[in-house]
Image (cartoon, helix red, strand yellow):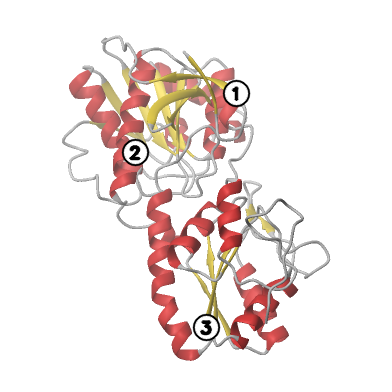
């Protein structure tokens, strides 16, 4: 066991692969929960192949996450069933946000599924909410393993989650295309991307796509400063401006009014719409024609890029090996480029925000206006910008 400092600066016990996995037959359930994500099928395929071919074990796939566990909706998975699914987006098992703690008899139904199918473990694949369910089930004594999944890349204690790189590539491709139309019409184009609480997708795609301004939840924005940067670009002959904004980005208190978000039946904020508000404010304040494009669920869809296929495969194999080791309550993770395990209870405690160096890099590439802090100097130090 190694003692490492993770990206959120908390110290946790981490097992680094490879492990001394005991080879013995098991019956392992697997499910995919929460929003769909490129790379889910790679996890299913990796887990199934490792279990069947390497460890002489059986995998039962439960449809539509924990709903399938409670409703006994399942299928037996084998190598033949998983053939050809690696490049497919979505999940062959389906998904939902339903979970046993939302039902009075939920835990009894989960226990019944373990007994009915002779399960030795269930591998839960999902985002922060799904990992919280895995953590709670472990506390209730269920043998469970977690696999982190989110295009937002906001789960702590893993360097990256599969699906993130695909989402970044999709957003970058869109930004590349929007540059030419913005330049042709001399417009401001606001591109709204996913990122409920963190701005990983926005920062990465904004930098990769050459956006002039990128706004993220980690740093509330001042609409007057945003407009000043756009006007300054126009004065210098740059008549097209691309702005990338994460759906969860917010203005500094007292600088711009936005409506309170609605809440869905699972208690999550229904975000989206900041792009339209921003474009409207920019046009009203500057007089420069502004338009908005929300990429929405296209970021989740389609074939995963190579990185996400490989990472998903590695996670699937590692989850099976954790189950074979009876290492319950663990989440597989990417740590310094290697696959390891971390306590899932530790992983769900804090969201992983954008690293300070990337935030600084983002500030370095935005248009400068007088009074800006110099990105190469300590905080609070500023230099004038000549007209």
What's the residue at 23%, 17% (across, down)?
Answer: 55
Residue for badge 2: 311
State whether residue 107 appears in this view.
Answer: no
Circle 1 packing at 10 Å, graded few (<14), some (14-19), many (20+), is: few
Badge 1 vs badge 3, beta-carbon distance below 8 Å: no
Q: Is residue 130 above or below residue 111?
A: below
Which is more toward the observer, 52 or 325? 325
Q: Is residue 46 above or below residue 217?
A: above
Element under label 2?
helix
Q: Is residue 126 above or below residue 383?
A: above
Q: Name the spot of residue 50 as percent of width and height, x first.
A: 24, 25
Q: Is residue 303 above or below residue 236?
A: above
Residue 334's mark?
Answer: none
Q: Name the spot of residue 295 as percent of width and height, x first.
A: 47, 67
Question: Quadrant where the C terminus lies?
Answer: bottom right
> Which label's residue is closer to the chain start, 2 or 3?
3
Element under label 1?
strand
Circle 2 packing at 10 Å, graded few (<14), some (14-19), many (20+), is: many
Element under label 3?
loop
Residue for badge 3: 240
Horizontal side of 92 relative to 386 (left or right) equals: left
> Which label's residue is closer to the chain start, 1 or 3?
1
Residue for badge 1: 11
> Which label's residue is closer to the chain start, 1 or 2?
1
**Separation (CA) of disc 1 from disc 2:** 23 Å
Q: In the figure, residue 62 lies in which quadrant?
A: top left
Depth check, mark 1 against mark 2: the one in front is 1
Circle 3 packing at 10 Å, graded few (<14), some (14-19), many (20+), is: many
């Amino acid at each position: 066991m190694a003692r490492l400092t993770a990206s959120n600066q908390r110290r946790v016990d981490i097992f680094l692969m490879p492990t001394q996995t005991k080879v013995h037959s098991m019956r392992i359930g697997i499910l995919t929960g929460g929003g769909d994500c490129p790379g889910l099928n790679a996890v299913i395929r990796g887990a199934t192949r490792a279990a069947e071919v390497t460890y002489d074990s059986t995998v039962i796939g439960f449809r539509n996450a924990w709903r399938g566990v409670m409703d006994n909706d399942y299928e037996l998975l084998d190598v033949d069933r998983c053939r050809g699914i690696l490049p497919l987006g979505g999940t062959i098992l389906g998904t939902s946000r339903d979970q046993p703690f939302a039902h009075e008899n939920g835990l009894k139904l989960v226990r019944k599924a373990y007994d009915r199918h002779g399960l030795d473990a269930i591998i839960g694949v999902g985002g922060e909410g799904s990992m919280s369910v895995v953590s709670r089930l472990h506390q209730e004594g269920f043998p469970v393993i977690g696999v982190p999944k989110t295009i937002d890349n906001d789960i702590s204690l893993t360097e990256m989650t599969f699906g993130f790189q695909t989402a970044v590539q999709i957003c970058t491709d869109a930004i590349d295309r929007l540059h030419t139309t913005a330049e042709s019409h001399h417009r401001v184009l606001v591109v709204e991307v996913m990122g409920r609480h963190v701005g990983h997708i926005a920062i990465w795609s904004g930098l990769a796509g050459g956006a002039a301004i990128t706004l993220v939840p980690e740093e509330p924005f001042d609409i007057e400063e945003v407009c000043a940067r756009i006007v300054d670009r126009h004065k210098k002959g740059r008549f097209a401006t691309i702005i990338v904004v994460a759906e969860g980005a917010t203005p500094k208190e007292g600088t711009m009014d936005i409506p309170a978000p609605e809440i869905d039946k699972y208690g999550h904020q229904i975000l989206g719409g900041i792009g339209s508000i921003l474009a409207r404010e920019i046009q009203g304040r500057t007089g420069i024609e502004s338009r908005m494009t929300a990429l929405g669920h296209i970021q989740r869809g389609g074939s995963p890029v190579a990185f996400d296929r490989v990472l998903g495969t590695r996670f699937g194999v590692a989850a099976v090996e954790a189950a074979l080791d009876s290492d319950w309550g663990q989440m597989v993770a990417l740590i310094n480029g290697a696959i390891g395990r971390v306590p899932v209870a530790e992983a769900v405690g804090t969201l992983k925000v954008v690293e300070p160096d990337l935030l600084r890099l983002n500030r370095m590439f935005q248009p400068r206006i007088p009074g800006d802090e110099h990105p190469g100097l300590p905080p609070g130090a500023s230099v004038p910008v000549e007209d």
